[in-house]
Image (cartoon, rainbow, N blue to C red):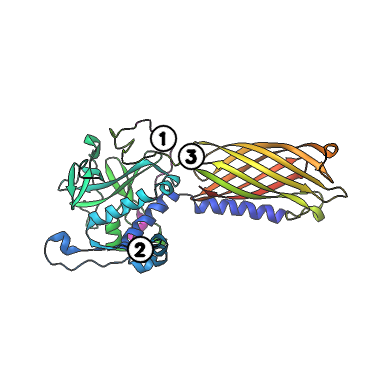
Amino acid sequence: MKKLLISSIMLLFLLVATNADSFTDILQDLAIQTACIGQYSATQAGGGWYDDPQDYYTPAMMAERFKNMSGNMTRTTTFYGVCFDYAEFAYWDIKDYQTLYNNEGMRESQFFLAGVDSNSNVITLSSPSNRNEATRIQNGVPVKTYGSASFRDVKTHKMLNGERALHHAWLWIMRNDGIWFWIDPTWTDNLGYVVYGYVANGEEIQLRPDEKYCINYPDYLKNLPAPPKWGKKLAPSTSTTTSSVSTSNSSSSSSNPIGGYFSFGYTGSINLENETESSFFNFNKCGFEFSTETVADQGDIFAIFSYDYLIDYSEEKTVDSWLVGFDWGYGLLSFFQPYLGGSLGMKWTDSFSWKNIGFAWKVNGGIRIPLSSFTVRTDISYGTILGLAGTVAVGMYF
């Protein structure tokens, strides 16, 4: 039992560590996915014949993913183009899978094409649009800006020679604590490592990429800063207009993701006094749990509604029970969410009849760890049927 408890604790810390910054992970993943789809055309960019830069990321590197994404079609749309094409492809991936990005920490609909002309001190944010709503045509694509909020007095990120980007396009994405991040899938493809960062003190700052996403990893990357720590989540936007890029975007039909987790769990008894009866997987004294759970991020309150079937067949009598439970939880972090609660119900001995029915209860406390589209939850409980017990549950997001 001690080994089981230690193993469970180690598993929890491992899960926390691997999910410590899922937001920057999904941004880096998006950068290389877009780089795999595209190939940069120097001729298109320069207006004459030029040798193209090396295409480090190719479709074959993500062939299995692209197969799954293509659905019933047996092809993947790729492109041979310029920086705007990379940025637009990345934009539409977020648009198509917005709930996933929101669940990983993106704020509402705060993702935009970022562009710069000849002034590296001003970045323009925009979104692909129809021709009726467009405020400009960029690379043949109608795009919409949002008044003065679209024009940011922010210095662009730097090239290898130290000069700032000009005549370029990439992507801005806001984290749910209000910090803007950026990814440059074009430079990612041309350099062989993820080029991304965040905005602070009036400039785009490049961050150290994770080596698992990189083909090249020059030494200077090791000296780049790590992502800023997650701050307090901003309150949901109350505006339904696009008066401010930083708070809303009318091209989106929703803000925070709507959905929840459906979970299935196993409950095993814990007998610390008698080692011969302390097996967690003693199926004569155990239970099963079905639950629905609300989604929460850092600073959010969430609820768990559970339905337990618990049995104790370890004595001469057999005891069955049904319990209905409710838990309140709080997201200390987006990936570390403690909760407390209890369950009430009925039990019956040997056979189900009015004279054999009794009252059953349990109280419990635990930790939930959301991991993108699924969640892992574990708790310790004490009740009338199993006594001291532990539960491990896994849920899927719907």
Q: Specify whether residue 165 is in view.
A: no
Sequence-first tag of 3 and 1: 1
Amino acid type of the residue that numbered disc 1 sits on in the rendered structure: Leu
Corner quadrant of residue 328: top right
Q: Nearer the viewer, mark 1 or mark 2?
A: 1
Q: Specify whether residue 304 is in view.
A: yes
Q: What is the CA distance from the residue labelled 3 to the residue labelled 1?
A: 10 Å
Q: Which residues are magenta?
A: 217-239
Query: Along the horizontal axis of the image, is 240 left or right of 231?
Result: left
Sequence-first tag of 3 and 2: 2
Q: Residue furthest left?
A: 48
Seen in the picture, residue 73 relative to 141 is either above or below; the reply is: below
Label 3 with label 1: CB-CB less than 8 Å: no
Identify the residue at image location x=37%, y=57%: 222
Q: What is the CA distance from the residue labelled 3 to the residue labelled 2?
A: 32 Å
Label 1 neighbourhood size at 10 Å, few (<14), some (14-19), many (20+)? some
Q: Which residue is disc 3 drawn over? A: 298
Q: In the drawing, what numbered circle is on residue 217?
A: 2
Q: Which residue is disc 1 drawn over? A: 234
Q: Nearer the viewer, mark 3 or mark 2?
A: 3
Q: Main secondary structure of the magenta part?
A: loop
Sequence-first tag of 1 and 2: 2
Query: Along the horizontal axis of the image, is 295 left or right of 324?
Result: left
- Residue 355 on the magenta span: no
Q: Residue furthest top?
A: 238
At numbered mark 1, what does the secondary structure look like: helix, strand or loop? Answer: loop
